[in-house]
Image: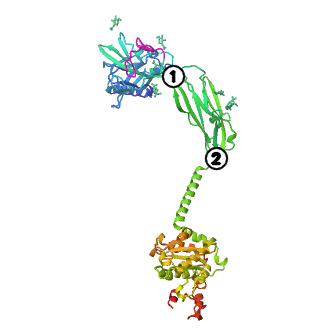
Amino acid sequence: MACELCVFLWCLCVSEIQCHDWGVWSKGSVRVYDGEVAYLYCPLFSHPTLYSYSQTQNSSLSLLWYRHPHTHELEQPINLKLHTLHKDREYLWIQPASAQDAGLYICMLRNISSCVKIGVELEVIQKDGECDRRAQPHLNLTIPFQSDQTLTCPNLNTLTLPNSTHSVSWYHLCRTELFRGDRELKGDDLVIYRMMEPYTGLYTCVVSYQMNGRTLQFTRNINVIAVVPDVGSKVPIVLNPASDQIYTVTLGDTATLSCRVLLPHLYEEKQYIWWTVDNKTLEQLADPRFSSPEAKLVSNDYGDERKERVLYVMDFSADDLQREFNCSARNSRGINTSRAVLKTEPYVPTLELGCGLGVTLALMLMMFVIYHVFWLELLLLYRSWFGSDERYTDDKQYDVYISYARNSEEEEFVLSTLRRVLETEFGYSVCIFDRDSLPGGTITDDTLRFVGQSRRLVVVVSPCSAVRGTQALLELQAGLTSMLHGGSLRVVLIQFKPVQRKSWVKELRRARLALTLVRWQGEKSAPLSSRFWKQLQLELPMRRNTQHTQHTQHTQTLLPDITQHTPDTHTQNTHHAEEKLIDPYSTSAL
Ligand SMILES: *[C@@H]1O[C@H](CO)[C@@H](O)[C@H](O)[C@H]1NC(C)=O
Ligand SMILES: *[C@@H]1O[C@H](CO)[C@@H](O)[C@H](O)[C@H]1NC(C)=O
Ligand SMILES: *[C@@H]1O[C@H](CO)[C@@H](O)[C@H](O)[C@H]1NC(C)=O
Ligand SMILES: *[C@@H]1O[C@H](CO)[C@@H](O)[C@H](O)[C@H]1NC(C)=O
Ligand SMILES: *[C@@H]1O[C@H](CO)[C@@H](O)[C@H](O)[C@H]1NC(C)=O
Ligand SMILES: *[C@@H]1O[C@H](CO)[C@@H](O)[C@H](O)[C@H]1NC(C)=O
Ligand SMILES: *[C@@H]1O[C@H](CO)[C@@H](O)[C@H](O)[C@H]1NC(C)=O
C-alpha cells in the first residue's frame, strides 16, 4: 500500500518536472462581456509546424485544460461536466462566462514521454449598455477609399456547433442602421461597396444562437479605418532636407538635423528612414558623436504617414562641414535620398553672453543707484581729480564774495555759520563788504572792485524789501553785470529761508534760471557732510587741499582795505589783520 502511494507520487513528480512550461501567451488573452460566450484557443496550435491538432491524434497526445484562478495557488483541472464548459478540438468554450470565470487558463499537451503547456488569460468585463462606444476593438480593419470590403463578424466561423441556428446584428457607432446604398447586409456579413469617410469608426456585431434550449451570444468590435487607395508610385518622399533648404550649424555646438519623410500607406510593411554620413550609416560610422533616435510620427493622413528622424552631431567641427549628410527613406516600392546642405554660424555662447549681459545690467543699475545717491560726492571727487585750480589761472584776490541783506534774518547765518565754514573748514578766502563799517562816502567803486576781485559771488537771497536800495542790491547788480558780460565771476544763490519768488528783486528773478540755488534746510544742513555744503562746495572754486593749514593764507576780510578809507582807529594793524580772522560784524560795531 505504502509502495503503491510511493510509485504514484513518483509518477506525479516526473510528469510535473517533464512538462515544458511556455508561460503565458499575452497576445492570446481574451476579453468577454459578462454573460456572453467566451472561447479560448489553445495557443500551442498557433505554431502549426510544432503542433497541429490532427497530429496530436497520431502522437497519442491529449489536450488537457487547467485553470489557475487568481484566488487559488494551484492549477485545477477543468470540470468539463459543468454544462457551461465545452471542449471542442483546440477550443475551450465557456457558455456563458461570468465574472467568476476570469483568470488564467492553461492548456497542456501530454503523452507518456512528453508534456508541454501554455497559459492564456480570460478577462470578463461588464458591458456598458447594449453597445459600448468606447470598446476596445477586436480587430482593426483598414479599407482604401472607393474600394469595397466585406465585414464578417470575427469568430463566427468557429461556431461549428451542429444544428446551430444563429443570427447576427450589426451596429455602426452603436447605431442600428438600415445599411442601404453603399453598405448592405448580406447574410451574416456587412458589405461596404464604396468606402467613404463617414463609414469609418467602430462597428459592432452581436451573434446570438440557441444551444441546449438556451440563447447564447457574443459581441465583437471592429474598428474600420479609411486609407488612401493603393495608386501612384508609393515611393517614400524625403520632404526635408528640401533641395533649397540650408541647415545652420554652429561650430563647437551640437548640430540638430531634422529629416521629414512622407511614407505612403502600404499594407503590413515596415518602411525605413535613416541618416548617412559620407554614405555610411551611423552603425558603420560607430562614432559616439553621431546619434539618431527612432523616427517619430508627425502626422497620419489616412495611412500616409509623415515621420521625422533627427540626427544629432555633437561638437560639430569644421571637418564635419565637409561631410555629406544624407537622409534616406525606403520601402518595397523604392528609395529616396536628400542631402542636407550646411552653413556655419559663429559660435555664440548664449549662456556666457546672457551672464555677461546680466552682469552689465546689474552694474549699470548699481551705477545708476550710486550716481543718484552719491552724485554730489561723485561730482566732488571728479572735480578733485580732473578740475583745475582757478588760482593758478587768474589773478583774483578772493574766492568768495558774500552778499546779503544787512540787519536781516540771514545776517547771523552769514556771519556765524557760512563765513566760518567757508574760511576755516574749506579754506576759502572770503570777502564781506560791510557798509556799516564805512562812515558815509561812496562805496560803489569799492563794491565793484571787490566783486570784480572775487571768483564767486554768493548771494544770500532775501525778500526784496530787505534788499532794495541797499549794499546787497549793489553787490548783486555788480555780480550779475560782471557775469552777464562774460566776466570770470559766477553767481551762486543761497536760500536761507524760503522766500517767495515774486518777492525777489527783479534783477534776481531775471537771472534765476541761469543761476544755481542752494537751499539751507535748517538743522539738517548744519553738519559739514550735509547736502547743502557739498552742493555749495561744488559751486565754489576747487581747492585741492581744503585743509586748515592753508586757510590763514587765503583768508582775508575786506576790513583792512576798507579801513584805509577811514582815518579812524586800527590803521596800524590793517595788514596784520590778514593773518587773523576778523569778524566784520564786530568791526561794524566800532
Ligand atoms: C496520422 O495518422 C493517420 C493514419 O493513422 C495518417 O493518415 C495521418 O496523415 C497522420 N497525420 C499526421 C499529421 O501525421
Ligand atoms: C509524444 O509526443 C511527442 C511529440 O510531442 C512525440 O515525438 C512522441 O513520439 C510521443 N510519444 C508517444 C509515446 O507517442
Ligand atoms: C488597433 O489599433 C489601435 C491603434 O492603432 C491599437 O492600439 C490596437 O491595439 C489595435 N488593435 C488590434 C486588435 O490590433
Ligand atoms: C440537426 O438537423 C438535422 C436536419 O438539418 C436533423 O435531422 C437533426 O435531427 C438535427 N439534430 C439535432 C441534434 O437537433
Ligand atoms: C553608397 O554606398 C553603397 C554601398 O554601401 C554603394 O552601393 C553606393 O553606390 C554608394 N553611393 C554613393 C553615392 O557613393
Ligand atoms: C526623391 O523624391 C523627389 C520628389 O519626388 C524627387 O524629385 C527626387 O528626384 C527623388 N530623389 C531620388 C534620389 O530618388
Ligand atoms: C546624397 O543625396 C544627394 C541628393 O540630395 C544624392 O545626389 C547623393 O548621391 C547622395 N549621396 C549618397 C552618398 O547617397
277 to the left or right of 46:
right
Badge 1 vs badge 2, beta-carbon distance below 8 Å: no
Circle 1 crowding by C-alpha within 10 Å: few under 14, some 14–19, many from 20: many
Give me the C-alpha separation between circle 1 and circle 2.
45 Å
Q: Tell me what residue is drawn at x 57 percent, y 71 percent.
A: 380
Q: Tell me what residue is drawn at x 54 percent, y 85 percent.
A: 435
Question: How many numbered badges does the structure rendering display?
Answer: 2
Q: Is residue 136 magenta?
A: no
The disc labelled 2 sits on which kind of residue?
Gly
Instruction: Check disc 1 and report the residue beneath it.
Output: 227
Q: Return the x and y of residue 589 as percentages of the image width and height.
A: 50, 90
Task: Look at the image and tell me whether residue 583 can be seen.
Answer: no
Circle 2 crowding by C-alpha within 10 Å: few under 14, some 14–19, many from 20: some
The disc labelled 1 sits on which kind of residue?
Val
Q: Which numbered marker is on residue 252?
A: 2
Q: Return the x and y of residue 516 as percentages of the image width and height.
A: 55, 70
Task: Look at the image and tell me whether residue 190 can be seen.
Answer: yes
Q: Return the x and y of residue 195 as percentages of the image width and height.
A: 48, 18
Q: Tell me what residue is drawn at x 51 percent, y 16 percent.
A: 147
Q: Is residue 176 magenta?
A: yes
74 to the left or right of 291:
left
Frontmost residue, 3 versus 387 = 387
Instruction: Report helix, strand or loop for mark 1.
Output: strand
Instruction: Report helix, strand or loop for mark 2.
Output: loop
State which region is magenta: 170-194
